[in-house]
């Protein structure tokens, strides 16, 4: 199967996150041509800072295989991994990482820094970036645009409620 095939699966996971009003990031782990784990962000749902798609997928894959070593696995993720996820990827010995959209603020697979290929660590990953980057970026852009619109609307409603309270107070 192609990188695009698995990235489409990661985008399905990202869509699941979005439907929960989570930042839409999805991850899939493939080993020997079969998906052994998939996950999406659940930070808001679980109120857990480490409930990133990559970490949830890695945990699921380790449980599924009965080992923490994912040496021949490939991780597909819709957004470039952050420092925390990059650390977990290295610790789990994932062989290859394929990501869609670059993350200029926290990407640790070459954009902000490259932890995954730093030779000072005892493990490095093969990297492929920009797979379905447009689609991966669009789901994030749309999510954050909608979030800003919702927050703006909520602020407007709160101002109107406060104004109504003041008007009732002064009219009494």
Image (spheres, rainbow, N blue to C red):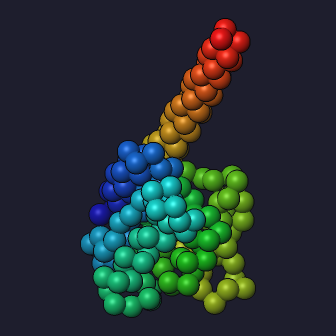
Q: Is residue 6 visible?
A: yes
Instruction: Examine the rendered structure and indicate whether residue 97 appears above or below residue 17.
Output: below
Q: Is residue 22 left or right of residue 37?
A: right
Residue 78 % position (x, y): 48, 55
As drawn, which residue projects farthest toward the front? 172
The structure residue drawn at horizontal position 65% and vertical position 11%, both measured from the top left corner, is 172
Residue 157 rendering spot, x and y as whole percentages: 57, 23
Q: Left or right: 148 with respect to 70? A: right
Asked whether residue 132 appears in the rendered view, the answer is: no
The residue drawn where x is 54% and y is 31% is: 150
Q: Quadrant of residue 123?
A: bottom right
In front: 4, or 24?
24
Residue 100 versus residue 161 in the image, above or below: below
Q: Nearer the viewer, residue 134 or 48?
A: 48
Question: Quarter-wise, where is residue 30 in the image?
Answer: bottom left
Position of the N terminus by quadrant: bottom left
Picture residue at 63% right of the left edge, 53% below the top:
103
């Amino acid at each position: 199967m192609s990188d695009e095939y698995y990235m489409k699966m990661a985008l399905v996971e990202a869509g699941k996150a979005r439907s929960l009003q989570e930042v839409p990031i999805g991850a899939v782990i493939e080993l020997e041509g079969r998906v052994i784990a998939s996950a999406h962000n659940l930070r808001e749902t679980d109120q857990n800072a480490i409930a990133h798609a990559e970490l949830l997928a890695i945990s699921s894959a380790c449980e599924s295989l009965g080992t923490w070593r994912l040496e021949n696995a490939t991780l597909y993720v819709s957004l470039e991994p952050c420092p925390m996820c990059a650390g977990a990827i290295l610790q789990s010995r994932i062989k290859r990482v394929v990501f869609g959209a670059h993350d200029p603020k926290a990407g640790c697979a070459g954009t902000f820094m490259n932890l995954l290929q730093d030779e000072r660590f005892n493990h490095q990953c093969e990297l492929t970036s920009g797979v379905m980057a447009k689609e991966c970026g669009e789901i994030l852009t749309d999510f954050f645009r909608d979030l800003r619109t919702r927050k703006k609307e909520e602020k407007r409603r709160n101002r109107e409620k406060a104004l109504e309270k003041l008007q009732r107070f002064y009219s009494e």
